[in-house]
Amino acid sequence: MAWDFSTEPEFEAKLAWMREFVREEVFPLETLDLDHDTFLRGVRPLQEEVKKRGLWAAHLEPELGGQGFGQVKLGLMHEILGQSTLAPFVFGNNAPDSGNAELIALGIKASGREEQRSQWLEPLLEGKLRSAFSMTEPGAGADPTLIKTTAVRDGDEWVINGHKWFTSNGSVADFLVVMCVTNPDVHPYAGCSMILVPTDTPGVNILRDIPTMEHPVEHFGKYGGHSEIIYTDVRVPYENLAGNEGEGFKMAQLRLGPGRIHHCMRWLGQSRRAFDMLCERAVSRYAHGSYLAEKQTIQNWVADSMAEMTAARLLTLYAAWKMDQDGAPAARTEIAMIKFYGASVLYNVIDRAIQVHGSLGFSTDLPLEHMYRAARAARIYDGPDEVHRVTVARQVLKGYKPVDVPTEHVPTRRAAAKEKFASLLEDATANL
Ligand SMILES: Cc1cc2nc3c(=O)[nH]c(=O)nc-3n(C[C@H](O)[C@H](O)[C@H](O)COP(=O)(O)OP(=O)(O)OC[C@H]3O[C@@H](n4cnc5c(N)ncnc54)[C@H](O)[C@@H]3O)c2cc1C
């Protein structure tokens, strides 16, 4: 089977334009420390330019204004966007709004609840509404089957009770996509549903934005915060169900597959930016009689980083290609592999880039320390490394059967070979 990650020259031209645009128009904005709302107002002309080029919200299906590019092309685009945390906003595919828009679109397709298009989906795509995804609970993270938040039907309404945390952007969102148990009598994979909850509904109590390694000081209501939320007798109309009852996990899986490919390609964009800083410093800094680039340890970092990034890139493009060929379920093992491998490459390359810069790397005069703190979370969100390793190992081990004697046991193989080639050996020794 031939693997083909190539794209046509017209698309390559789009990528070349994106590279230049992100470097020239978006990178400089990073240094201005604008608050999020000022930033969003300021980048409208850039967003218009992106729309004119047909690259706005490209992850969506064509009927929603996307381009139907497929995962390989989207992956290559995300590699460019990932270089700057601001670029996804300029291109209309910032998390978690992009993933939530996909979820709502999937839900409309499955349930036929068309009114959700004008109520939630279109304003979300136009940036008039902001959203958050509320699934993780203090007692249910890596194993989401432990979710305890319930939604009980009462006439035409859902009544939601539960405790969530790490709902990214919860405190600035207009609505929350909440994963709830709607049927406790079946396995959670068939008993959970997603429900759209306006943030100002009585009973939605956003306790705090949890201080983290990335944002150690809590600023409630700031973009990028991770909210802890108590839902107490929260009533929303039955029609706020996204998709069908019991399909919460199915929808989450459909959303997470492509999302992980985009994460990994964005991480490669970040890795490359850190790598460029590493190499630039190596050829510029003189210490102990030579440039750092001439010292073997630094050369090892350059070589190892390049090899790891190339491996992660090919692995990710392969997962994207497989998803394009055979669908997300067929690419499950590959997606799990890139999630933990890509996160480790990102972390390693940034770490080396900090080290080669010494005190400057540790300082906020370079973006590396912030990139490093953000990179640490990549090994946890969207499923921690260990869980993805379990997925890969389980799939791989399905191809093996237990044996009493190892298949490669040399004495056993020798005895079998003697038997197999008995006449040949007899002839060979007889002619001596
Ligand atoms: C920056 C950030 C943003 C997030 N945004 C959101 C969001 O918007 N919405 C949302 O719902 N959630 C969000 N999360 C939560 C995220 O999805 C969870 O952190 C993740 O699923 C892991 O759950 P947990 O933190 O509860 O870890 P736990 O479930 O407590 O797991 C802890 C550790 O146990 C180990 N472990 C778990 N299972 C296994 C296993 N099977 N084998 C071996 N080891 C295992 C792993 O080392 C794991 O790191 C976010 C998290 C972060 C850090």
Image (tube, rainbow, N blue to C red):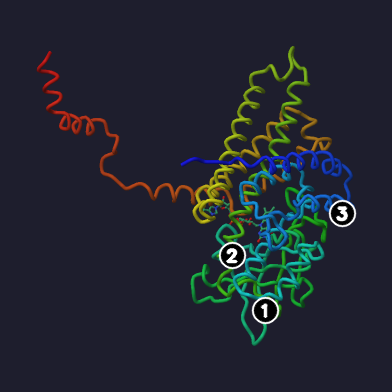
Q: How many marks?
A: 3
Q: Secondary structure at mark 2?
A: helix
Kindly identify the amino acid type of the residue bearing the numbered disc 1: Glu
Residue 151 location, x and y as percent?
63, 77
Q: Earlier in the sequence, mark 2 or mark 3?
A: 3
* Quarter of the image with the C terminus in it: top left
Distance from the alpha carbon under mark 1 to that under mark 3? 33 Å
Kindly identify the amino acid type of the residue bearing the numbered disc 2: Met
Taking depth in this image into account, of 378 and 79 the one nearest to the observer is 79
Residue placed furthest toward the left: 430
Ligand 1, image quadrant it occupies: bottom right
Q: Nearer the viewer, mark 1 or mark 3?
A: 3
* Label 1 beta carbon less than 8 Å to ligand 1: no
The residue wearing badge 2 is 251
Taking depth in this image into account, of 127 and 211 the one nearest to the observer is 127
Residue 265 visible in the displayed image: yes
Residue 180 visible in the displayed image: no
Above or below residue 76? Residue 427 is above
Q: In the rendered view, does 305 fall on the left or right side of 174?
A: left
Distance from the alpha carbon under mark 2 to that under mark 3? 32 Å
The residue wearing badge 3 is 44
Q: Residues within 10 Å of mark 2 (few under 14, many from 20)?
A: many
Q: Earlier in the sequence, mark 1 or mark 3?
A: 3
